[in-house]
Image: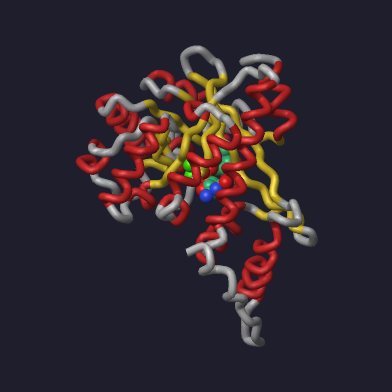
Amino acid sequence: AKEQGKNKYQVFHTGMNMQSYRSFIMQNDLRKAIERNEFELVYQPRVNVVTGKVESAEVLLRWHHPSWGSVSPNEFIPIAEQTGLIVKIGDWVLRTVCQQVKRWQENDYNLVRIAINFSARQFMQKDFLSNIERILEETGVAAHLLEIELTESALLENEDFVINALHRLREIGIMISIDDFGTGYSSLQYLSRLPINILKIDRSFVQGIMDKSSENRSITTAVISLAKSLRLSVIAEGVETKQQLEFLGLHGCDEVQGYLFCKPVPQQRFEEMMLQGNG
Ligand code: C2E
Ligand code: CA
Ligand code: CA
Ligand code: CA
């Protein structure tokens, strides 16, 4: 499947609109982005609601395009997924994170678990697990320092394959979280059979916590109690206000992540934060 995206350079033809022109250029430029060193990883700390300490962080990909500047992952990740380039890009993300964590291990930083986003397409690769194991072995990173964020859609692909892969990840010792939880369609019965550790409440619900209508509050508290009854941790993303934090704390959310505490920061800034200890 790695070969799939490689030889399919799309031919530009007149009649394409600006949007497809941009994505045409983007596809071709994405292929060279790794070699040209255009990717950067930024880190967003998550805060434990009870202790106020940073216990983990999510790593997010940034692409600095030579002529467009910074391109949002919301724009280039879907293109990377469609073309299959996400497999190679995802490998780069995992390897780079592991190399960084290894340096932190060696330099006695205040280590926290790093959560990496995985696309369904990556997760469904036959060599997905052996690849992770190899990278862990090569870099000597402790598995418990890694977390994999998967969306519900990734879990709905091939049930047996998914359950098997998740069990093996758990054996290795990697944490698994379900990202954007509540926006997909996984059934509760299915969920209860998956060896996962964490549910992440989607930002759209968190943003609506102070709405007049109670809908988003109900969904948020329902996700938290579901997590508790399945003995999972629950993390809220996109927390921007004190009111949202208060509501989440009151209802037993474990960790929070959002602009209220910290935007995603470059590696160097994140390292400074880890040296200062959990402030
Ligand atoms: P996501 O996994 O749901 O990541 C959370 C997004 O919310 C990030 O956007 C983050 O910067 C943003 N965010 C965090 N706190 C707040 C807040 O308080 N308010 C608001 N408005 N936004 C907040 P970002 O970095 O632009 O990433 C967008 C999406 O791109 C991610 O959504 C994820 O689906 C995808 N993505 C990013 N990096 C990777 C990667 O390395 N691999 C894969 N497969 N996907 C990635
Ligand atoms: Ca995520
Ligand atoms: Ca998310
Ligand atoms: Ca989201």
Q: Residue at x 36, y 47 (%)?
A: 152
Q: Residue 47 occupies which quadrant of the picture?
A: top right
> Depth check: 164 or 194 in front?
164
Q: Residue at x 48, y 39 (%)?
A: 133
Q: Is residue 102 left or right of residue 193?
A: right
Q: Is residue 219 left or right of residue 145?
A: left
Farthest residue to the right: give it: 67
Horizontal and vertical percent position of residue 52: 54, 15
* Residue 98 appears in the rendering: yes
> Depth check: 27 or 220 in front?
27
State whether residue 81 is above or below residue 17. above
* Residue 212 appears in the rendering: no
Horizontal and vertical percent position of residue 123: 43, 50
> Depth check: 21 or 90 in front?
90
Farthest residue to the left: give it: 189
Q: Residue at x 42, y 29 (%)?
A: 173
State whether residue 267 is above or below residue 121. above
State whether residue 165 is above or below residue 144. below
Q: Is residue 176 left or right of residue 195?
A: right
Please give the count of numbered marks on the rendered protein: 0
Farthest residue to the bottom: give it: 14
Indicate the colouring scheme.
secondary structure
Q: Residue at x 73, y 23 (%)?
A: 272
Horizontal and vertical percent position of residue 135: 55, 40
Q: Quadrant of the C terminus?
A: top right
Q: Residue 25 occupies which quadrant of the picture?
A: bottom right
Horizontal and vertical percent position of residue 83: 54, 66
